[in-house]
Image: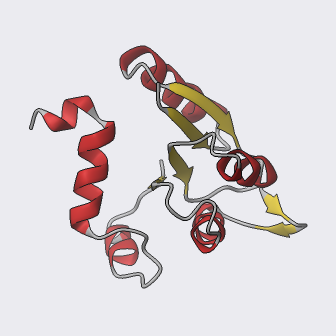
Amino acid sequence: MANILVVEDDKINAKLFELVLTRVGGFAVTVTEDADEVIRIASEGQADLILMDVSLSNTEYEGVPVDGIELTRILKQDARTSSIPVVLTTAHALRGDGSVFSSSPERTATSQSRSRTTGRWCPLCRAS
């Protein structure tokens, strides 16, 4: 069974992710908003996929506030965690936000690899 790490600070969104991923997807799910725990879980190889909230509002790493984008950068710079797919999520997208992420030099995957990742992790997506 694949292990999905959900990094989310909103309790309702976290519960929704957990319910859908466990009941519909059949995945093992760990939910946290603690950056140190994210790094530990990922470094120990306990996450096959990470769903990362972009706007973590109260999260710190080594005493410094971080959001989901910065936490993803930290993961991608570490050889132990750089190969784990990270899908950035948000419940607060505004018109035009997509261009910010798609044009960012720090983006972690090309469109082609995003499609492969989506097909691998989403049984409903493979049918399309």
Location of residue 114 by image quarter: bottom left
Q: Which quarter of the rendered picture does the C terminus lie within?
A: top left
Residue at horizontal 32%, vertical 65%?
95
Number of residue marks: 0
Residue furthest to the right? 63
In the image, 120: left or right of 20? left
Q: Position of residue 87 (x, y in %)?
A: 44, 53
Residue furthest to the left? 128
In the image, 97: left or right of 3? left
Q: Is residue 16 above or below residue 98?
A: above
Residue at horizontal 31%, vertical 50%?
117
* Model colouring: secondary structure
Residue furthest to the top? 23
Q: Is residue 127 above or below residue 98?
A: above
In the image, 125: left or right of 101? left
Nearer to me, 22 or 15? 22
Q: Is residue 124 above or below residue 83?
A: above
Location of residue 126 by image quarter: top left
Residue at horizontal 29%, vertical 35%?
122
Q: Position of residue 112 (x, y in %)?
A: 21, 64
In the image, 60: left or right of 88? right
Residue at horizontal 57%, vertical 28%?
29
Q: Position of residue 8 (x, y in %)?
A: 62, 43
Q: Position of residue 50 (x, y in %)?
A: 53, 47
Q: Is residue 4 above or below residue 78?
A: above
